[in-house]
């Protein structure tokens, strides 16, 4: 059997019809009665050409094509597909058997995923008519190859155990869960006992679209784009990540660098062997590069060139780093599992393991302090070795005390990983799935690998221990946690909202009439002077419509005023958090908002303050 590649032309059609006419090849696919004619209403037509390739297999190629098609179906919100063999996308066609095999496997893969799939027969001339939708996603093309030979991290044995708050170990199969351990039990079931995950579309996706969070259809899979509102949110989260890490209490130096590294550089190559198949690689000028999956490579490459002394340790290096991971296309999830994301990556360089443990306690405290600010709890996996656990059991008991619940331990083989402790901090989302938001590692291997060293008290060379952490997690994942928390609010009968400090607009001003827009501008200016982000709905629309738009935008404070409010100097303010309408002075409103945003970063509005000057964004 020859190997093959697929070329796809994807058309979102109102209607597509075909009729088989006569043989196009000597031995076409057997023409069943049901395949002589076909109709697709409001679905995706996949014009498909199977090419010869160098290293392909029908199974791998079809699997990758199915994942790519599934991604497009998700964008289009349809589950109907027509696979249509179409030889005109290439001059390098595969033979009959591999072509038919690939098409059949592709059909089977999509059927297994629950889509309505039909397939036109191979090897026949067919007439067809098509009516395309005509929107930006209605015509797309893809070239699908078998998955390239991936770097594979070896699968190593591990053992899950549960440590209670006294330090005793228990089997996950027999552990008794006490009150308030529902989320911890869910983590153990999914991660340690490998029980099935629930399906369905997460509710938060609707929320994400309100703020302009979307997939970028013109790029590789797993790439997001941010509209004006979500861009402002990400800027605020970046500022906050930079602010939070300084509460650990050590000197931190901000750095910045590139995202592309040569895989032939020895420490890079060695590190990739541990990272495995998620490396996102590309070839340029006959060299292979890997896109960094955090700030490690850049920061380590930089710090190795610094002159370090025991007097300067501990210190940290920090960057909100463009990061890349070759996540499987079928597992991609908006704002959570991405191929390109923003990692506020902090590395702390310490003299020895004891110092790393002491600072690590502070990092762990900060991580839990932050998640509790958004009224959530982490359920975490503690990946470690038996020897590190036995020698440092007090550390684990103290971490359990911070968690206020047992720990799920995963014992890994000695001496394989560069870390001795790797904590994965998960929330349990609305679909009852563990979602890793942040991490913390104690790294004993990379300093020597990258030749990062310092002079001790005797002037001798030593290698520091390195802590890796992103205290609030990846920026998109932290935003995912905020949106999932809003889902929880809604389930509890509350109005979903973001924390006030990260809401794109703190207050929206809505005058009762066009004649009061000038007075609205005066109120707006006073709010801005107090560093409160505010905008003004000056559109010629009904009051109900403008209030509804503010509600759909999750504006925390909606200020509605007319002549009476101006005379009394008491504004009518709708508060989203408690759903009440209050009468308050402008100074009292300023005090209230400032108390809710105190201690958090502040940025000015980055798009027009007047709603009449904005392009229309769709609210759902």
Image (cartoon, grey):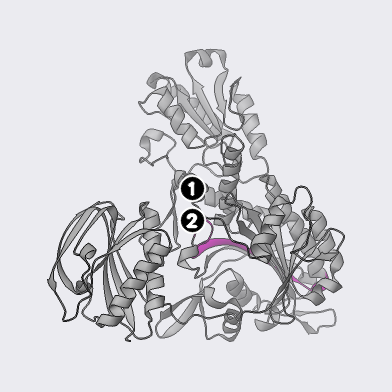
Pick the quarter of the image with the N terminus: bottom left
- The image shows residue 611, relative to residue 164, as above or below, that is above
**In the image, 205: left or right of 448?**
left
Of all residues, the one furthest to the front in this rendering is 33
Measured as percent of width and height from the top left, residue 352 is found at: 80, 74
Q: Residue 329 versus residue 422: which sits nearer the camera?
A: 329
Residue 193 position by quadrant: bottom right
Of the 4 image quadrants, the one containing the C terminus is top left
Occupied quadrant, residue 486: top right
Q: CA distance from mark 2 to mark 1?
A: 8 Å
Give the residue furthest to the left.
Answer: 22
Q: Which residue is mark 2?
A: 334
Crowding at label 2, few (<14), some or many (≥20) Cα neighbours within 10 Å?
A: many
Q: Which residues are magenta?
A: 333-354
Task: From the viewer's side, name the closer residue of 50 and 229.
Answer: 50
Q: Where residue 477 sits in the image (x, y, percent)?
A: 57, 56
- The answer to the question of whether label 2 and label 1 lie on touching residues, with beta carbons closer than 8 A, is yes
Residue at x 49%, y 51% (from the top left corner): 201
Residue 208's disc is 1
């Amino acid at each position: 059997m020859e190997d093959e590649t697929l070329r796809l032309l994807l058309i979102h059609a109102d209607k597509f019809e075909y009729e088989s006419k006569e043989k196009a090849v000597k031995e076409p696919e057997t023409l069943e009665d049901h395949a002589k004619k076909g109709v697709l209403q409001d679905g995706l037509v996949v014009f498909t050409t199977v090419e010869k390739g160098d290293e392909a297999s029908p199974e791998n190629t079809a699997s990758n094509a199915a994942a790519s098609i599934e991604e497009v179906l998700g964008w289009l919100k349809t589950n109907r597909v027509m696979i249509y063999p179409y030889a005109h996308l290439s001059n390098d066609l595969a033979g009959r058997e591999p072509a038919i095999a690939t098409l059949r496997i592709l059909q089977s893969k999509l059927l297994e995923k629950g889509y309505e799939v039909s397939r036109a027969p191979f090897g026949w001339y067919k007439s067809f008519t098509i009516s395309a939708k005509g929107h930006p996603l209605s015509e797309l093309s893809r070239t699908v190859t078998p998955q390239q030979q991936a770097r594979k991290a070896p699968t190593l044995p591990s053992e899950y155990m549960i440590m209670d708050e006294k330090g005793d170990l228990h089997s996950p199969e027999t552990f008794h869960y006490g009150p308030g351990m529902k989320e911890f039990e869910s983590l153990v079931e999914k991660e340690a006992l490998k029980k099935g995950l629930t399906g369905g579309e997460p509710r938060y996706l609707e929320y994400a679209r309100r703020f302009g969070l979307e997939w970028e259809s013109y790029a590789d899979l797993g790439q997001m784009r941010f509209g004006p509102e979500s861009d402002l949110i990400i800027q605020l989260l970046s500022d906050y990540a930079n602010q939070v890490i300084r509460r650990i209490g050590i000197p931190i130096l901000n750095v910045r660098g590139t995202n592309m590294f040569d895989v032939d550089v020895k420490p890079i190559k060695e590190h990739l062997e541990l990272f495995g198949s998620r490396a996102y690689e590309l070839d340029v000028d006959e060299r292979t590069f890997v896109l960094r999956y955090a700030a490690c490579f850049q920061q380590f490459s930089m710090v190795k060139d610094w002159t370090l002394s025991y007097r300067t340790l501990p210190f940290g290096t920090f960057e909100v780093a463009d990061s890349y991971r070759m996540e499987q296309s079928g597992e991609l999830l908006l704002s959570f599992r991405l191929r390109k994301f923003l990692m506020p990556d902090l590395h702390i360089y310490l003299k020895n393991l004891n110092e790393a443990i002491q600072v690590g306690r502070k990092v762990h405290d900060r991580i839990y302090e932050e998640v509790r600010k958004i009224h959530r709890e982490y359920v975490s996996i503690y990946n470690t070795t038996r020897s590190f656990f036995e020698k440092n059991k007090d550390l684990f008991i103290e971490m359990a005390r911070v968690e206020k619940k047992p720990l799920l331990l995963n014992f890994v083989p000695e001496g394989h990983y560069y870390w001795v402790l790797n904590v994965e901090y998960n929330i349990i989302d609305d679909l009852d799935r563990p979602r890793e938001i942040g991490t913390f590692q104690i790294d004993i291997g990379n300093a020597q690998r990258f030749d990062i060293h310092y002079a001790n008290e005797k002037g001798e060379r030593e290698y520091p221990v390195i802590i890796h952490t992103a205290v609030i997690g990846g920026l998109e994942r932290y935003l995912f946690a905020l949106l999932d928390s809003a889902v929880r609010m809604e389930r509890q009968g509350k109005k979903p909202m973001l924390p006030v400090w990260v809401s794109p607009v703190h207050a929206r001003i809505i005058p009762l009439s066009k004649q009061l827009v000038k007075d609205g501008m005066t109120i707006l200016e006073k709010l801005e002077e107090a560093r409160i982000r505010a905008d003004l709905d000056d559109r010629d629309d009904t009051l109900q419509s403008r209030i509804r738009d503010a509600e759909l935008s999750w504006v925390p404070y909606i200020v509605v005023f007319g002549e009476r409010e101006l005379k009394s100097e008491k504004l009518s303010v709708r508060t989203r958090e408690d759903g009440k309408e209050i009468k308050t002075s402008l100074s009292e409103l300023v005090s209230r908002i400032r108390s809710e945003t105190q201690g958090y970063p502040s940025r000015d509005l980055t798009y027009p303050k007047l709603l009449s000057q904005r392009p229309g964004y769709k609210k759902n």
